[in-house]
Image (cartoon, helix red, strand yellow):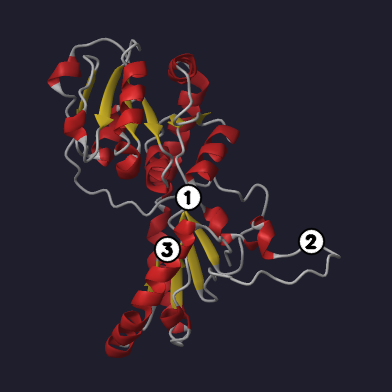
Amino acid sequence: MLALNTKRTMAFASRIKRLDPFIKQTIDTLKPDVIVVDHVLCIPAVEVSGIPWVLTCSCNPLFLIESNCEELTPPKGSAKPLPKYLYFNPSPYLNIYPFPKELDYTDVRPLPPNTYQFDNFMHIKNNIPFEIPVPLRDKPGKLVYLSLGSMGAVDVKNMKRLVTILSKSKHRFIVSKGPLHEEYDLPVNMWGAATVPQLQVLPVVDLVITHGGNNTIVETMYFGKPMIVLPLFGDQYDNAERVECKRFGKRLDAYQCSESELLTAIDSLLNDKELEERLRKISHRIQSDNSSANLPGLLENLLADK
């Protein structure tokens, strides 16, 4: 259950209220054996359908932990009422989430009931190797990937600030410039485009500078790269804190980090051989375990119990 009385949450709630009748109609028409949901708020039509449903939590797994949200329960002995609005219910049937073991919170709490962790839900098949662009190919320095996601990239003022700082680095940068890519140019130690094939780029870079979106965190761990996380909103702050807490990278302020902070963090992480070896071993474990191969069995068991 999640009680977040923010404008963003209320916007999600309004959308669910608008779409719920259509979801109910779709369920009544299709009569599925199981429903898979990936949303931060509960969907009434799904929960009252009587059909087994699976919750996929594609954000930081703290969203699945009731005890993490202090606002859900009043202080002991206070006799205060429960919150008026509870927007998020874990599935009583099956809850799944992609988050590498090495970043997960199972070191401080057990998994909730009917909840399963997977290292990732990535689909990697026959990816064409990414060729380092000609402008960067023969330049010195390590290769760094910068992406603040589609929402972070539209803040052109901040993107300009960051690339100006990075222009003073001795390293090379691949930049995901976003939809407003034509509104700013890149320095000579950078190459970028409106969109960059991230799954192809990650294997060839030495460091990732990211906003901390869950997909990028998971994918970066899969390929064993250190991170500098510049969170912008939501669970990105949780991811940034966890990356730094577990010593897989650094957390910096996306808007306030200084030139010295950012450039020092880059050099520190790129020169950390112990971290490089740790991440190499983690990447090997994740790819060898292939934990997502266990998901079909969970779904089959759920259907068998109907």
The CA distance from mark 3 to mark 1 is: 26 Å
| Badge 3 or badge 1: first in the primary sequence | 3
| Badge 3 or badge 2: first in the primary sequence | 3
Q: Which mark is residue 75?
A: 2
Mark 1 vs 2: CB contact within 8 A: no
SS label for mark 3:
helix
The CA distance from mark 3 to mark 2 is: 29 Å
Residue under label 1: 99
Q: Nearer the viewer, residue 287 or 228?
A: 228
Q: Which residue type does callout 1 highlight?
A: Phe
In the depicted structure, whether residue 271 falls above or below residue 241? above
Q: Which mark is residue 11?
A: 3
Mark 3 vs 2: CB contact within 8 A: no
User: How far across and how far down the image is residue 177, in percent?
Assistant: 24, 33
Q: Which residue type does callout 3 highlight?
A: Ala
What crowding class fits label 3: few (fewer than 14 Cα within 10 Å), some (14-19), or many (20 or more)? few
| Badge 1 or badge 2: first in the primary sequence | 2
Total of numbered circles in the picture?
Answer: 3
SS label for mark 2:
loop
User: How far across and how far down the image is residue 220, in percent?
Assistant: 39, 38
Q: Residue at x 61, y 64 (%)?
A: 112
In the depicted structure, whether residue 54 falls above or below residue 214? below
In the depicted structure, whether residue 293 falls above or below residue 285? below
Q: Which is closer to the viewer, label 1 or label 2?
A: 2
What crowding class fits label 1: few (fewer than 14 Cα within 10 Å), some (14-19), or many (20 or more)? many
Q: Quadrant of residue 53?
A: bottom left
Q: Residue at x 38, y 30 (%)?
A: 208
Q: Which is closer to the viewer, label 3 or label 1?
A: 3
Q: Which residue type does callout 2 highlight?
A: Pro
User: How far across and how far down the image is residue 202, in percent?
Assistant: 31, 34
The CA distance from mark 1 to mark 2 is: 30 Å
